[in-house]
Structure formats: structure tokens, C-alpha cells
Amino acid sequence: FFRVPSEFYESLVELISLDLSFNSISGSIPESIGFQSNLQHLELKHNKIGGSIPSSLGNCKNMSWISLFDNNLIGRIPHQLGELTNLEYLFLGRNQLDVNPPSTKIPRSVITLPKLEMGHPRVENNP
């Protein structure tokens, strides 16, 4: 598996679109991704990325598309994503995110996005 160092994200200050899909990337999404104030499109689908979704993504005020589909993400969806007024598409399916009752903590602002894909949750079969 390939790991993207956090310095990579920090060095791309004019970045508008980042697509690293289908690259067997492991590790986590660094908080430094939030330094990308011009970032509009983030595609990290079909990798092996773990950890939680960084709340710093809420700093990317121009973001309109986020696809983190089919990774190993865990935890809750940060409410900061719901504050992205330009965000139209959020694809989070096939992860291990905390979206099942009674612990559902999906922010109302995220639920009202024009396109929210939470389907195809990965089900862990614990003996």
C-alpha cells in the first residue's frame, strides 16, 4: 500500500482538484488537507484509507464534491462538512462510519445536501 505524506497536501496551495482514486493508499487523511482553500473536488475513493474524516475539510469553503467511497473510514461525519455552502456531492458509502441508530450523529446540515450517498455500508460480521 502507498501512504501519502501530509507534506504533500501542504505543498499544493493552488490545488483545485485532487483525484487519487484506485491507488491502494493507506494511512489517514491528514488535517492539513484543510489548508487547501482553493480545493473544490476531492476524490479518494477505492483506497485503504483509515481513521476519521478530518474536520479541517470544513475549511475548504470552495469544496463542491467529496468522494471518500470504499475506504476504511471510521467515526462520525464532522458537522463542519455541512457548513460547506458549495458542497453538492458527498459520497461516503462502503466505509465503517457511525451512521446507524441509536448512535447516528449525522449533522442536519449534511443530511440536506443535494446529493448525499451513504449507501452500501460495510457490514462487519463479529462472531
Image (cartoon, grey):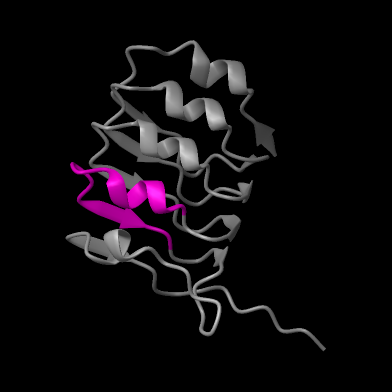
Quadrant of the drawing holding the N terminus: top right
Q: Is residue 68 above or below residue 121?
A: above
Q: Residue at x 39, y 69 (%)?
A: 118
Task: Name the quadrant containing residue 62.
Answer: top left
* Magenta-colored span: 78-92
Quadrant of the drawing holding the C terminus: bottom right
> Where is residue 61 shown, x and y percent of the image?
27, 32
The one of 45 and 118 positioned closer to us in this rendering: 118
Q: Residue at x 49, y 75 (%)?
A: 104
**Furthest-bottom residue in this view:** 127
The one of 20 and 80 positioned closer to us in this rendering: 80
* Magenta-drawn stretch contains 86: yes
> Where is residue 74 shown, x and y percent of the image?
61, 59
Left-right relation of 66 to 74: left
Task: Name the quadrant containing residue 2.
Answer: top right
The one of 80 and 68 positioned closer to us in this rendering: 80
> Where is residue 86 shown, x and y percent of the image?
18, 41
Numbered marks: total: 0
* Magenta-drawn stretch contains 57: no
Left-right relation of 115 to 4: left
Q: Is residue 42 above or below residue 98?
A: above
Q: Residue at x 27, y 36 (%)?
A: 63
Q: Is residue 87 above or below residue 8?
A: below
